[in-house]
């Protein structure tokens, strides 16, 4: 199949979270299955052309892309996803992407991604590429489904293409002023209370994707069920219920060329199940690097996350003072909402022997934490898939998670499995959204941490699990084949 994948991030070029990891790895797996995949992301000016050997496509001629009543010139750069032959195209438009990183709160945020969506279609038309499948991801590419289904020109250009829209996080609606509709070249016929483009009197890119795509996927089976309810649907649950027969949950895979302690170039001591003593050496290295003391049998907790309400730090906040009274250490890497940055910075200041906080984004440190920590904390309120808990399994870093979305689908509580007569638990989980439930779960994990034989078994269960892309990529292909053009 000829697949065009459109998104706002792709690792290693531009990443803020899991979406970047997925777009950096799923196309490679689809390519391995014999399909032709072209990826499109914006060319944020901070993506260095020379470091990635990107080529400017001169032969496309001048392309001007309309946003409202303005026309903006664009350029296209091309490269390959590292370790593959998958082509990635970068839409360059100085006006919108120069000196700005992926997401902004600027007043022209809607225009940035309207330009990107229309530019992708213009480039395909110029190159005479008629994809079998458009695979759009999250609100940043949610305009493409509406353009292809309703805009006379784009409709005529891609009459055979089917559209699959993947929700990586329903919590980000891409909600903008209704002026965005004419800026995108769409018709106000679709803007009325409850209509395809209307969302709380505004224009939502996410709604456009959900309404006009032929098939919808999200990134775990449990999340696909959860988003049908008001608690998780973020206002889209009605539309999703209406479209339920076209909705499928496919768990994300991970790229074990990158996230695997046997080959990870960012950790000093490689390891696998047979030489776990090297994991301990990574812990010593990490602690030394951040200026903390190492003591045998003292567990190190790790957090790598966007610091936002979604990730459940509201459950952790009231526990910090009691946790630091225990013989534990905690390392936090992340950035986000001021409240949580303050919380962890304060803990670092007050308990420098116990808590280390790095506010910011640091890919290398994230690998070191996966390798060096003993326990990974991810008490999310909701979690579409979550990747860090899956990385943690491979790194023998036992996850403590809240049972929601992809966390519920990948982490199996040790005690719960024991009660069911099985010894295949790979972590610890809890359901109730309360600090106390999290605290109890941490206590349970610490109890087993001090029982080396059991702990090793839990680590082994996790390290043996295989979440590589192959199976999930096959599920995408099956779905792509079923996606029938519905107009
Ligand atoms: P989400 O997409 O909701 O942010 P995921 O668990 O799906 O959460 O993916 C998060 C990805 O982003 C992981 O690869 C994680 O390592 C990475 N990440 C998150 N915060 C940081 C950070 N501050 N520094 C480096 N990597 C980070």
Image (cartoon, rainbow, N blue to C red):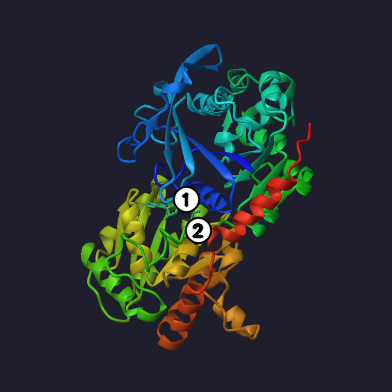
Label 2 beta carbon within 8 A of ligand 1: no
- In the picture, the quarter occupied by the C terminus is top right
> Residues at badges 2 and 1 in contact (C-beta under 8 Å)?
yes
* Numbered badge on residue 254: 2
Q: Secondary structure at mark 2?
A: loop
Position of 391 with respect to 131 (left or right) is left
Q: Secondary structure at mark 1?
A: helix
User: Residue placed at 29% from the left, 70% from the top?
Assistant: 269
Where residue 233 appears, x then y in whole percent?
Answer: 66, 47
- Visible residue check, residue 151: yes
Where residue 456 appears, x then y in whole percent?
Answer: 44, 82
Label 1 beta carbon within 8 A of ligand 1: yes
Cα distance between the residues tagged 2 and 1: 8 Å
User: Residue placed at 47% from the left, 50% from the top?
Assistant: 21
Where residue 44 appears, x then y in whole percent?
Answer: 39, 32
Does residue 417 lie above or below 304 as drawn? below
Position of 57 with respect to 28 (left or right) is left
Along the line of sight, the residue nearer the viewer: 253 or 420: 253
Which quadrant holds residue 391?
bottom left
- Visible residue check, residue 432: no
Which residue corresponds to mark 1? Answer: 21
Mark 2: few, some, or many residues within 10 Å (few <14, many ≥20)?
many
* Numbered badge on residue 99: none
- In the picture, the quarter occupied by the N terminus is top right
Does residue 222 lie above or below 464 as drawn? above
User: Residue placed at 53% from the left, 62% from the top?
Assistant: 468
Sequence-wise, the earlier of marks 2 and 1 is 1
């Amino acid at each position: 199949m000829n697949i065009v994948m459109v998104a706002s991030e792709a690792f290693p070029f531009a990443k803020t979270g899991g979406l970047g990891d997925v777009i950096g790895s799923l196309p490679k797996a689809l390519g391995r299955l014999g399909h032709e995949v072209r990826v499109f992301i914006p060319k944020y000016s901070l993506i260095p052309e020379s470091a990635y050997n990107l080529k400017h496509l001169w032969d496309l001629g001048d392309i001007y892309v309309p946003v409202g009543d303005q026309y903006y010139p664009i350029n296209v750069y091309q490269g390959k996803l590292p370790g593959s032959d998958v082509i990635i195209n970068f839409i360059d438009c100085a006006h919108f992407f120069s000196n700005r990183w992926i997401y902004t709160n600027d007043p022209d945020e809607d225009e940035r991604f309207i330009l990107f969506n229309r530019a992708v279609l213009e480039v395909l038309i110029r190159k005479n590429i008629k994809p079998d499948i458009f695979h759009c991801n999250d609100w940043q590419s949610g305009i493409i489904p509406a353009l292809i289904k309703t805009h006379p020109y784009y409709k005529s250009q891609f009459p055979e293409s089917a559209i699959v829209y993947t929700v990586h996080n329903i919590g980000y609606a891409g909600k903008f002023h209704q002026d965005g509709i004419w800026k995108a070249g769409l018709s106000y016929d679709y803007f009325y209370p409850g209509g395809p483009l209307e969302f709380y009197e505004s224009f939502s890119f996410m709604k456009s994707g959900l309404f006009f795509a032929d098939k919808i996927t999200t990134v775990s089976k449990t999340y696909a069920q959860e988003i049908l309810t008001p608690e998780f649907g973020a206002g889209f649950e009605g539309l999703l219920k209406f479209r339920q027969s076209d909705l499928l949950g496919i768990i994300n895979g991970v790229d074990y060329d990158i996230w695997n302690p046997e080959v990870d170039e960012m950790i000093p001591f490689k390891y696998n199940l047979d030489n776990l003593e090297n994991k301990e050496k990574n812990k010593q290295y990490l602690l030394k690097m951040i200026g903390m003391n190492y003591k045998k049998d003292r567990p190190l907790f790790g957090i790598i996350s966007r610091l936002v309400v979604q990730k459940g730090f509201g459950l952790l906040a009231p526990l910090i003072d009691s946790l630091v009274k225990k013989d534990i250490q905690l390392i936090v890497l992340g950035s986000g909402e001021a409240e949580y940055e303050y919380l962890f910075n304060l803990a670092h200041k007050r308990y420098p022997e116990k808590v280390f906080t790095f506010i910011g984004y640091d890919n290398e440190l994230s690998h070191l934490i996966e390798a060096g920590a003993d326990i990974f904390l991810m008490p999310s309120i909701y979690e579409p898939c979550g990747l860090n808990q899956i990385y943690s399994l491979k790194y023998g870093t036992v996850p403590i998670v809240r049972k929601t979305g992809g966390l519920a689908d990948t982490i199996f509580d040790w005690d719960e499995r024991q009660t069911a007569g099985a010894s295949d638990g790979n972590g610890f989980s809890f359901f109730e959204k309360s600090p106390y439930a999290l605290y109890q779960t941490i206590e349970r994990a610490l109890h087993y941490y001090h029982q080396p034989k059991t702990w090793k078994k839990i680590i082994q269960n996790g390290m043996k699990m295989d979440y590589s892309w192959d199976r999930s990529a096959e599920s995408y292909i099956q779905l792509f084949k079923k996606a029938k053009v519905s107009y």
